[in-house]
Amino acid sequence: MAALDRVKVLVLGDSGVGKSSFVHLLCQNQVLGNPSCTVGCSVDVRLHEYREGTPEEKTYYIELWDVGGSVGSATSVKSTRAVFYNAVNGIILIHDLTNKKSSQNLYRWSLEVLNKDQQPTGVLVTNGDYDREQFADNQLPLLVIGTKLDQIPEAKRNEVLTRTAFLAEDFNAEEINLDCTSTRYLAAGSSNAVKLSRFFDKVIEKRYFSRDSSTIPGFSDRKRFGGSFKSLHYD
């Protein structure tokens, strides 16, 4: 049996926003009972049916690289994380809906990947000093996910979701809001599951079917994807 083609998707966001809980729910269809802080990077894999139900349907591996969200020293932490930022095909940006700062920091996380070969600036936002134009032309597929939806009081929910909708608009990305302690939020056939499937299809199309699939526009090194692929697992 021939090996399945694969794509690499980074899962980024501040420490404690629920990245590991989301990845576990997505890949295992189970709630992560006792989440712990990810050190370095943890890689999980999900099988995805590209263009399911059409003549073009094909199975792919989706590698989800859950990158530890510790901030620490800008230079040391960023240079350590940079090893995970090569040959990326898509990015899932995760924030905590109850923590506005974690949503602001998504701009820094995206720029850290796109500018990974430049001098480190850290991922902390200070007075919103990010330049959104830096990623306006990025063609890498992005998905924005808000967690802990269940913890937002009903009276504040509309206000919070309106704010995060503008966030997704800035990234030109689909948006999913969920509670990682309930499997129903990613249940087959749900609107969230449909958005995820559409995002993974877009990642695969960009990697394997676009004329410029050998490069990532916006990435300063513009490395080619050809050749062998080594999958690293860090606990």
Image (cartoon, rainbow, N blue to C red):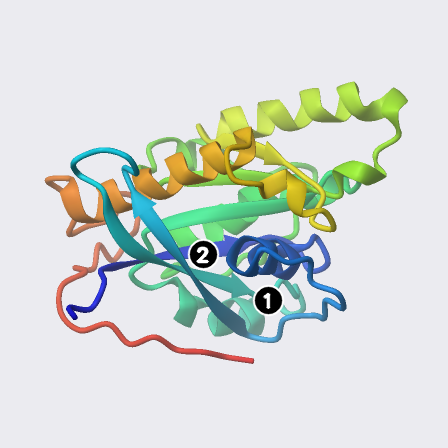
Which residue carries the number 1 mark? 68
Picture coordinates of residue 188, whole percent (x, y): 52, 39
Q: Secondary structure at mark 1?
A: loop
Query: Camera-side residue: 171 or 48?
Result: 48
Image quarter (top left, top right, bottom left or bottom right) of the C terminus: bottom right
Image-based side of 227 in relation to 163, left or right:
left
Pick whichever, 91 or 104, lies toward us.
Answer: 91
- Give whichever of discs 2 and 1 has the lower sequence position: 2
Residue 97: horizontal and vertical position, in percent?
73, 38
Q: Is residue 22 left or right of residue 78?
A: right
Q: Quadrant of residue 197?
A: top left
Mark 2 and mark 1 residues within 8 Å of each other at the beta carbon: no
Name the disc covering residue 126, or none.
none
Query: Residue at the spot x=58%, y=58% of the render?
Result: 122
Q: Classify 169 as above or below 97.
A: above
Type of amino acid at the residue the image marks with label 2: Leu
Tell me the residue that label 2 is attached to.
Answer: 10
Q: Residue at x 51, y 27 (%)?
A: 170
Query: Of helix, strand and loop, which one carries label 2?
Result: strand
Q: Quadrant of residue 210?
A: top left
Q: Residues within 10 Å of mark 1 (few under 14, many from 20)?
A: many
Which quadrant holds the N terminus?
A: bottom left
200, above or below 89, in the image:
above
Measuring 44% from the left and 28% from the top, which residue is drawn there? Answer: 172
Could you tell me which residue is drawn at 56 percent across and 57 percent down? 23
Q: Locate residue 92, reporting x and y percent.
A: 49, 47
